[in-house]
Amino acid sequence: MPLVKPLPNSEVPADLSDFFAITLGVTPNSIRTMSHRPAIASAFTNLNRAVMENHGELTSELKRLIGYIASTTSGCRYCQAHTTLAATRFGTTDARLNDIWKFRESEHFSAAEKVAFELAIAAASVPNAVDKALQERLQEHWSDGDIVEIMAVIALFGYLNRWNDSMATTLEQAPTESAEEHLAERGWRVGKHARER
């Protein structure tokens, strides 16, 4: 059961709902919960817009895969489901999703993508595991601006991971179905994010 009940969609500002309709096809219950304090929901959505804009070499699909790896490292099942759904909406393939945790050996990821995934794991770990060697590898493959975008995705999901796990945010149907299709074989379950009966 969620700590705070999400507001009805009718009480979420339309510009927030519209943004998430494009990226997820649903207004997340996390945003509906943040909407108890509209300034927080609006500020978070504006940050999300800025982080997910692509100005360099990163794609929308890759950003969602980075978010998935960071969320899995943090243990947030809600965000694992959402990032899987969003990655598929932005064109990821079954091969990439199936190999995501074998990325180091997989032919489905470039060297640049692999080091971005390493950063997602290291930066989402507690304690933080980003070291000089990883920083140097990042700089071999990504521009400063791209590194800022990668780190912004990881940090954005750090916020969401803590929010959704602590709030026990109820998981919506579409992300649940996506996670059950793509992640169940790896042990994913709804857990504390189950729907109220």
Image: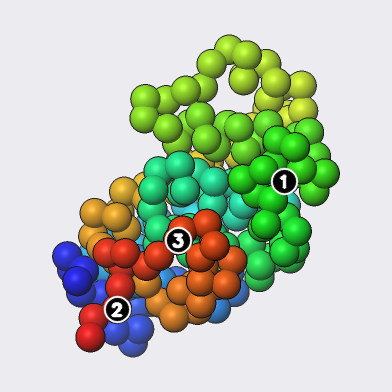
The amino acid pointed to by label 2 is Arg
Instruction: Provide the residue designation for mark 2.
Output: 195
Residue at 48% from the left image edge and 31% from the top image edge: 123
The residue positioned 72% from the left and 64% from the top of the image is 94
Determine if residue 188 is in view: yes
Type of amino acid at the residue the image marks with label 3: Trp
Which residue is labeled 3 in the image? 188
* Amino acid type shown at disc 1: Leu
Quick one: SS at disc 2? loop
In three-dimensional space, the C-alpha distance between marks 3 and 2, rounded to whole angstroms, equals 16 Å
Q: Secondary structure at mark 3?
A: loop
* Residue 110 position in % (x across, y down): 80, 39
Task: Tell me the SS state at disc 1.
Answer: loop
Q: Is residue 157 above or below residue 31?
A: above
Q: Quick one: 132 or 190, which is closer to the camera?
A: 190
What is the distance, in whole Å, between disc 1 and disc 3 at their CAs? 27 Å
